[in-house]
Image (cartoon, rainbow, N blue to C red):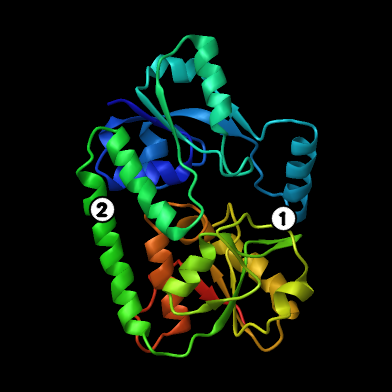
Amino acid sequence: MRLVSLLPSATEIVYALGLGDDLVGVTFECDEPAEARASKTVVVGGRDTTGLTPAEIDEYVRTEMAAGGDLYTLHADALAGLAPELILTQDLCRVCALPSGHVDDALSHLGCRSDVLSLDPHTLDDVLDTFEEVARAAGVPERGPVLVAALRRRLAEVAAAVAGRPRPKVAVVEWVDPPFGAGHWVPDLIVAAGGEPVAARPGQRSVATTWAELAAPGPDVVLVTPCGYHLDGAVRQAESVVPHFPGAAVWAIDGDGLVVRPGPRLIDGVEAIAAILHPDVVPAAPPGTISRVS
C-alpha cells in the first residue's frame, strides 16, 4: 500500500510498524527517522521559523489564524503524482499539522481516490490506540497489537520501578512566551513516570496561562518541552524559565523527540522523565535527550 504521512508522529508510527518502504510522501517536519525526509517526497511545506523567538512565532501563528490563513502548504500536484492509497493526517491542532479537511478538499479538486485516516489522540491510551488504527488501515492489522504490547511492557517496567515511591509535583512548560502548561497526553506521561502533574489539563488542549498559575502549586520539578524544538532549543528556553520557579529543579527535554509528538517515542519520554524523577531506580536517559538547567 502506498502511504503518505502529513504529520511527523504518523511517519514515526509507519516506521515502527515496519512500513517504511511503503511510505512515499512526508512533510518538511518529518525528521525521524532521518531517512524519511531524505528519501521521500515532501508534500507539505511551511514557514521556516528558525531564528524567530518564541514570542515572534506565537505572534505569527495568532496573526495567520485570525486572518483565516494556513500555517502549512499542501503541494497538491506532488501528492497527486504519488497516487497514495492511504493518507495519514489529523484534526487535533491546526498549529501542529495540516487539518484533514484541507486534504479532503484537495483530493476532491484533483479527482484523486485515497483513504484519509485522521489521527486525533487526546490521552496516552488514545495514542497507543492510533498505532493499531494505522496498522488496520494499512492492511497489516496483526502488527499493531504487537507494537502496542511491546510499548506497554516498557510502561509496566517503569511503573514497577517507581511503585510506592513519593511522587514529585511536576509542572510542564510546553511554550515559554506566552507560557503554556501541559495538555493532552503530556500529563499522562508524568503519571506514568512516577510524578504528579500540576497546573495541567489532562486530555484537553494546552492553553496560554501565566507564570504565577504555573508556579502556584509549588512544583518540585519543572520540565520545559517546547513544541517544535529538540534539546538545544529546549535548553535555551529553559534558562528563561528558571526565575519563575525558585527552589524547583528545572529540566529541558527534547520536546519533539520525546513529549509533544504522539508517536512511539512517547514511551522514551516516559522513561526519560522517570530518570529525572527517580534517578536511583530508573536507568539514565540517553545522551542528548534531557539536561538539567537549575
Residue found at x 42% / y 60%? 266
Q: Is residue 235 left or right of residue 17?
A: right
Quarter holding residue 156: bottom left
Query: Is residue 174 placed above or below 59 in the rendered structure?
Result: below
Query: Along the polypeptide, which appears first: circle 1 or circle 2?
Result: 1
The kind of residue on which mark 1 rests is: Pro
Residue 90 in percent (x, y) is at 51, 38
Mark nearest the camera among 1 and 2 is 2
Which type of secondary structure does the marked residue at label 1 adopt?
helix
Image quarter hosting the C terminus: bottom right
Residue 69 in percent (x, y) is at 73, 30
Query: Is residue 108 placed above or below 69 in the rendered structure?
Result: above
* CA distance separating discs 1 and 2: 35 Å
Q: Is residue 26 left or right of residue 222?
A: left
Q: Residue furthest top?
A: 111
Residue 268 in percent (x, y) is at 38, 64
The kind of residue on which mark 2 rests is: Leu
Nearest the eye: 28 or 169? 169
Within-10-Å neighbours for mark 1: few <14, some 14–19, many 20+? some
Residue 237 in percent (x, y) is at 66, 65
Q: Which residue is mark 1?
A: 54
Quarter holding residue 19: top left
Q: Which residue is mark 2?
A: 147
Q: Is residue 141 visible?
A: yes
Q: Is residue 60 left or right of residue 30?
A: right
Within-10-Å neighbours for mark 2: few <14, some 14–19, many 20+? some
Nearest the eye: 127 or 239? 127
